[in-house]
Amino acid sequence: MEPKTPAESEVRQGSAVQSLWGVLLAPEKTFQALAARPVWLPALLLLVASALALSILITPRLDMKQVIREAIEESGQEVPAAQIDLQVEMADKFKWVGTASQVILQPGALLLMAGVFLVLLRLAGSEIDFRRSLAVSVHGLLPQALATVLAIPVVLSRSELSMQDLRSATFLRSNLAAFAPESTGKAMLSLLSSVDLFSLWTIALLAIGFRVVGRVSKAAAWGVVLTLWVLMVGGKLALAAIF
């Protein structure tokens, strides 16, 4: 069954690009529009482009020698200086691979997220389809694109970046990790970085979007979004503990 909203006739006359700022300024009305016309490509392209732009700026500022030394120190191994230099040389050669992979990894992650939301919402009784799940997912994540754009001037002002900077993502000082002492462990730093202004904004937008577009209760929408968020934070903590 196709979800219908009172705004359908109004929505089809609007521009798909209008939803990019509309979701930030008037989320309820914008998600009603997306329920009637589930456009997703402009938002997806914006998310990918912003992530790619930030990665392009960060990569040349990474002190690979310091990054590798930190990793070796944390592992407790003793590595000869010649081997460290060799690892640094290899890392410098391949560090742009991670940047280039954003073109594939970002869309793949967004499609996967939309699929997970689709399954969870169907279990909650929604009749939402994949296109609408994807439309809500990419538009709900637009605060992250805004955070990325705001972080670009901060990155440009820095000549070098450390792994600590990347782990805590404290460029904008918008999360609790920005106020943690230097002695804070990696796992705790990862947890604190997850309590972020833009992340909370994203959670709220996704909950509103799936309530409107998925036509489920407020409790169900918040439950689905928070469940996936907790799983993602748990995954970050596990990776931080391992690496």
Image (tube, rainbow, N blue to C red):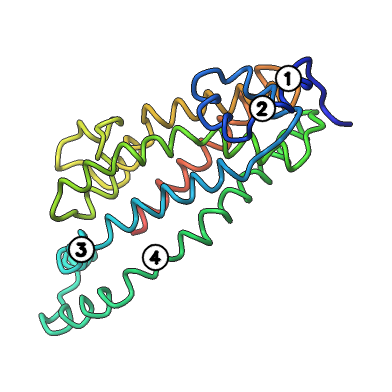
Q: CA distance from mark 1 to mark 4?
A: 42 Å
- In the image, which is nearer the foreground, mark 3 or mark 1? 1
SS for tag 4?
helix
Q: Is residue 227 above or below residue 76?
A: above
Label 2 crowding class (10 Å Cα cut-off): few <14, some 14-19, many 20+?
few
Q: CA distance from mark 2 to mark 1?
A: 7 Å
Residue 132 shown left or right of residue 188 in the figure: right
For badge 1, the amino acid type reads Glu
What number is the disc on residue 98? 4
Of all residues, the one furthest to the right in this rendering is: 1
SS for tag 2?
loop
| Residue located beneath label 2 in the image | 14
For badge 3, the amino acid type reads Val
Q: CA distance from mark 2 to mark 3?
A: 48 Å
| Residue located beneath label 3 in the image | 67
Q: CA distance from mark 2 to mark 4?
A: 37 Å
Mark toward the start of the polypeptide (2 vs 4): 2
What number is the disc on residue 10? 1
Mark toward the start of the polypeptide (2 vs 3): 2
SS for tag 3?
helix
